[in-house]
Amino acid sequence: MIIKAFKSGISKAWRYRRVVLVVYVTTLMLASLVALPFKGLLENKAGNSLIVSDLVKGFDYTFLNDFFQNYGEGFLPLWDQSILLVGFHFVFMIFLMGGIVKLVVVAPEKYDRLLFWGASGQYFWRLFRTTVYFLIIHGLILAFFVYLFLVITKGMSPEKLDSELIIVDTLKGLAPFYFFIGAFFFMWQDYTKIFIIEENRRFTTRPTLNALRFIMKNFRKSYGLYLLNILLLVLLIIGNHFLSCFLFVDSLKGIILAFVLSQVFIIGRLVLKLTRLGSEASLIKNKI
């Protein structure tokens, strides 16, 4: 059942690949609105400085400190603009989510533009409220694990610990629990979105509870399918990091290759997200 639902998710991702293009182009445009002003600031303030050459070497605290000391007066307005654009991108992705989930639930033979954009508007506020509720839940879970970590490590105070290795060991011990518990609630959020579209209720309480009932009734299949999708995402991240280590961005060719690799990574993430939602919708359809 898991493999069958996963294959269905892959099929939907291919059928509705135009959705990936829409999301990718939107993300690229917003990223450009952030990057271009910063590029202009660099060229205007430090274009003739040798300090700019350090950018291609990756993260460098000395470079960042020197840059902000000498040219930081124009950075704060750009930072505020970037925060606004990130917020807009977050909200717009919620808007598109209604259309994405509607497609994988209805499962037309090919991408339906009217269905996609109509559902994006129709379900926006319901999905927005759901996202806010689950963000609060995720925040509480993270806060609990941070609190637990600080209690065990005694506030990470070297004076109170027999060995600083306790900090590392505690982090390694808590991380798997946080991952699997957090994954459950992210999965619940996915299924809630699907049930909101399936049931088309005005309020989201019933779809949220029905999603939880479905998960608990089919826990092995639903959680196993979600972990399979997450495993592919982890492999994509590892693969991207591995390839990035072999790129030398000290030349034009290296910079171009690094940019292409980053775009392939973004598209890959979008495809996997569409695959995950499509496979979960197929699992619900086959089990109900």
Image (tube, grey):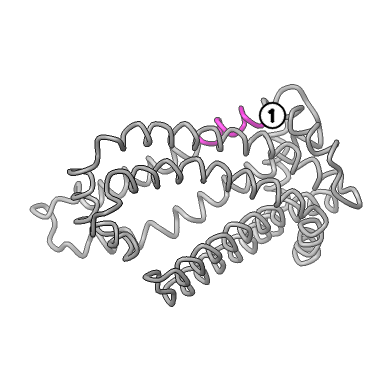
**Residue closest to the far right:** 109
Q: What element carries label 1?
A: helix
Look at 54% across and 32% down and name the residue there: 88
Residue 283, x across and y down, in percent: 79, 54
Residue 101, x across and y down, in percent: 75, 42
Residue 191, x across and y down, in percent: 69, 44
**Residue closest to the far top:** 202
Q: Tell me the quarter of the picture where residue 167 sits.
A: bottom left
Query: Taking 78 as reference, is 199 left or right?
Result: right
Query: Taking 285 as reference, is 160 left or right?
Result: left
Q: Tell me the quarter of the picture where residue 62 sits.
A: bottom left
Which region shows up in magenta? 126-136
Residue 259 lies, with reference to residue 31, above or below; the image says below
The quarter of the image holding the N terminus is bottom right
Q: Does the magenta stretch include residue 127?
A: yes
Query: Taking 232 as reference, is 87 left or right?
Result: left
Residue bearing mark 1: 124
Look at 57% across and 45% down and name the residue there: 185
Look at 66% across and 44% down and name the residue there: 190
Q: Which amino acid does label 1 sit on?
A: Phe
Residue 109, x across and y down, in percent: 91, 52
Between residue 219 and residue 9, name the one nearer to us: 9
Q: Does the magenta stretch include residue 68?
A: no
Residues packed near mark 1 inside 10 Å, few (<14), some (14 to 19) or many (20 plus): many
Between residue 183 and residue 231, name the one nearer to us: 231
